[in-house]
Image (cartoon, rainbow, N blue to C red):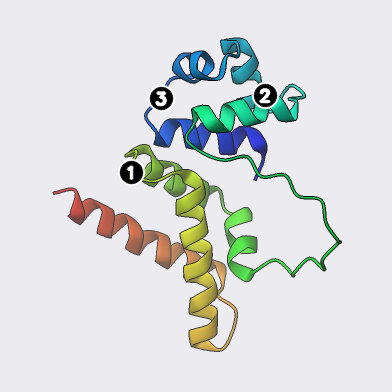
């Protein structure tokens, strides 16, 4: 996940505008807009002020290289699916959850499904899960 997407998701989940975050962080609106769009080279101090303005804490870690775990099947399925991107955006549009949280839950669910079935889920399984989630979302909004 890119920094800009994390910042935007966190800001939107809090129901904040770029202008209100900029004021609280003491940064300019164009600066934050550029960061959210993947441009710019922020300092640690600016990131710390942004995190504080968004009610978060900045964590910077320098440590030993740990072996990177292989990507999960759920992550790989979601990465290759435009439909999943649309569904994630739709579910996050309600403002109750961020795209990051929705995506993480879908990945965990797909991985758990693979454990349950004893084989990795296929793209058809992802489509079925997305259908189920959308149906549940529709019925809960009634």
Residue 71's quadrant in the figure? bottom right
Question: Residue at 55% of width from left, 48% of height from top?
Answer: 82
Residue 65 lies, in percent from the top left, at: 86, 61
Mark 3 surroundings: few (<14), some (14-19) or many (≥20) residues within 10 A: few
Q: Earlier in the sequence, mark 1 or mark 3?
A: 3
> Is mark 1 in CB contact (under 8 Å) with mark 3?
no
Mark 1 or mark 3, whichever is nearer to me: 3
Question: Residue at 49% of width from left, 31% of height from top?
Answer: 54
Q: Secondary structure at mark 2?
A: helix
Mark 1 surroundings: few (<14), some (14-19) or many (≥20) residues within 10 A: few
Query: Residue 46 has which mark?
Result: 2
32 w.r.t. 2: above or below: above
108 w.r.t. 10: above or below: below
Query: Residue 44 has which mark?
Result: none
- Locate residue 122 relative to residue 15 in the image: left or right: right
Question: Residue at 47% of width from left, 69% of height from top?
Answer: 109
Mark 3 or mark 2, whichever is nearer to me: 2
Residue 37 visible in this rendered orientation of the protein: no
Q: Secondary structure at mark 1?
A: loop
Query: Residue 16 has which mark?
Result: 3
Q: Earlier in the sequence, mark 1 or mark 2?
A: 2
Query: Residue 96 has which mark?
Result: 1
């Amino acid at each position: 996940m890119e920094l800009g997407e994390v910042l935007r998701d966190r800001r939107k989940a809090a129901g904040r505008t770029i202008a209100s975050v900029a004021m609280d962080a003491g940064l300019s609106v164009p600066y934050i807009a550029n960061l959210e769009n993947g441009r710019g080279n922020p300092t640690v101090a600016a990131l710390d002020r942004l995190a504080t303005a968004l009610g978060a804490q900045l964590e910077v870690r320098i440590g030993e290289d740990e072996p990177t775990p292989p990507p999960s099947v759920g992550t790989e399925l979601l990465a290759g699916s435009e439909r999943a991107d649309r569904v994630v955006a739709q579910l996050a549009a309600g403002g109750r959850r961020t795209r990051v949280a929705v995506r993480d839950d879908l990945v965990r669910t797909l991985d758990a499904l693979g454990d349950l079935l004893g084989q990795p889920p296929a793209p058809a399984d992802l489509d079925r899960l997305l259908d189920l989630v959308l149906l549940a979302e529709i019925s809960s909004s009634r």
